[in-house]
Amino acid sequence: MIETVCPVRLSLPIPPKEAKTTARNIAIITILFSLELLAGVFSFWAFLKKYSKYRDMARTFGLEYLPAGGPRIFSYAELKAATSDFSNIVWKGGYGVVYKGQLPDGRAIAVKRLKNISGGEAEFWAEVTIISRMHHLNLVCMWGFCADKEQRMLVYEYVSNGSLDKFLFPAHTNLNDNVTEDETDTNTTLLQPPRPLLDWNTRYRIALGVARAIAYLHEECLEWVLHCDIKPENILLEDDFCPKVSDFGLSKLTNKKDKVTMSKIRGTRGYMAPEWVIHREPITAKADVYSFGMVLLEIVSGQRNYLFQRDSTESEDWYFPKWAFEKVYIERSMEEIVDPRIIEGANDEAVERMVKTAIWCVQDRAELRPSMGKVAKMLEGTVEITEPAKPIIFCMPDEH
C-alpha cells in the first residue's frame, strides 16, 4: 500500500510468480536438509558400528596401547608390489614365509607372511602389540603390519646378514624347531651364501648385545615381555654383526610379579626350560634366561647344544651344560669347550666368564638362575661369578 501526495490510494499486489518461486525454494531447501540429515544419521550409525568393531578388537589385542605414529598399516596390494609378487623368499618355516622387499622410498624390508592364521591370530596380534612398543638397539624394528581380509603379515626392517645360526653351525645341523604338542616346524633359510667365520670378539659382542636386549624386555618395560623362544635362529645380525632379537610370535606380556601359564608346549627343542617342559609349571622370565644360557654355550662352542658330542663313547644321557661344567670345574680344560676354529684368538678370561655365566643360566631350578640384568653384568665383568651347582641331566621328552 502506497500513499501519494494526491488523495488517490494505489494498491500493488504481490506478483504471483514471486510467491510460487519462494514456496518452491522453501520446499527444495527442506528436502535437501532432510536428505542431509538422513545421510548424517546413516553415516554416524555406520561410524559407530565400525568404531565399535575396532574398539572391541583394540581392547582384545591391546591395540589401544600402540604408540602414536606407528606401526604403519599396509594393504595387501602394497606388500605384493614391494615384494615383487612375493617372489624373493629368504626364509620358510611351519608358521609362514619371510620375503625380502623394497618400499617406494627405497628401504629394504622383510615381510613375514603367516599361514594357518585361523589358529595363530593371537600370535599375530601378540607380535604386533609387543614389538611395536619396544625400542632398543638390539631388538629388530617392526615398521608395520597387514591385516587385510585373511592376510596377516608383519613388516620389519631387513637385517642383511641373516640369523646367527648360519654363522655358528654347519648347514646339516638346521634344527627342527618350534615343537608343539601337535606339530613340528622346520625352519629353512633358502638363501644360504657362504658365511664368514665369527671371531671371538664378534661372538662376545653378539652375546652381550642379546643379553642386554632380553634384560630390556624383562626389566625396563612397564610390563614384562617374556620372549619364550630365544635361539640362534631368532637372533639376526646387521652388516657390522650388531645382533637384533626377533620373532615375538610366542611372546607374552605380564606384570612383573605374575607367572604365565601356556596351554601348550610351544618353543624349540634344546632351548626350553625344564619347568616348562617336564613339570608344566607356569613360566617366568627365568625361562628366557635358560634359553639364553643354551645359546651362550653354542656361541662359545660353535655346536648345537643337543646334537654335539665330542666323544663317541659318551652315553645317551649326555647333557651339554653338564659336560661344560665338568670341563670347567672338574677337569679344568676350558679350551675343550671353545670352537676349535677360533681357539687361537680366544680370550681366556672372556671364555671363562661366558661359560660360567651360561652354566648359571641353565640351572634346573628357575630360582637359582640370575636375572637377565645380572647376566649382562656377569658378561661385562662388573660382578663376581661364583661357582654354580652342577646342572642335572635334562632331556626333552620325544613324545611331543
Image: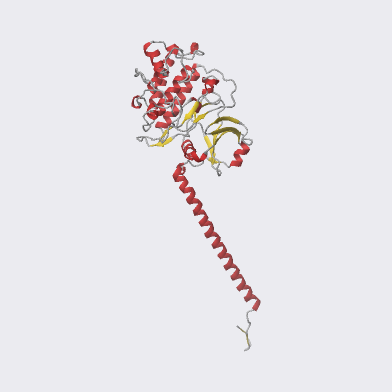
Is 17 or 198 nearer to us in this picture?
198
Q: Is residue 104 visible?
A: no
Q: Is residue 17 left or right of residue 152?
A: right
Residue 97: % across, % down = 56, 33
Q: Which residue corresponds to the image point at 41% horizontal and 19% vertical from the top-left?
A: 319
Residue 170: % across, % down = 54, 19
* Quadrant of residue 160 within the rendered picture: top right
Q: Is residue 67 above or below residue 397?
A: below
Residue 148: % across, % down = 56, 43
Q: Is residue 290 left or right of residue 166?
A: left
Residue 109: % across, % down = 58, 33
* Figure quadrant of the C terminus: top left
Q: Is residue 292 visible?
A: yes
How many badges with numbers are in the image? 0
Is 272 or 72 nearer to us in this picture?
272
* Quadrant of residue 27 within the rendered picture: bottom right
**Can you name the residue that lies furthest to the front here?**
399
* Figure quadrant of the N terminus: bottom right
Which color scheme does this rendered protein use? Answer: secondary structure
Is 104 or 337 nearer to us in this picture?
337
* Quadrant of residue 29 within the rendered picture: bottom right
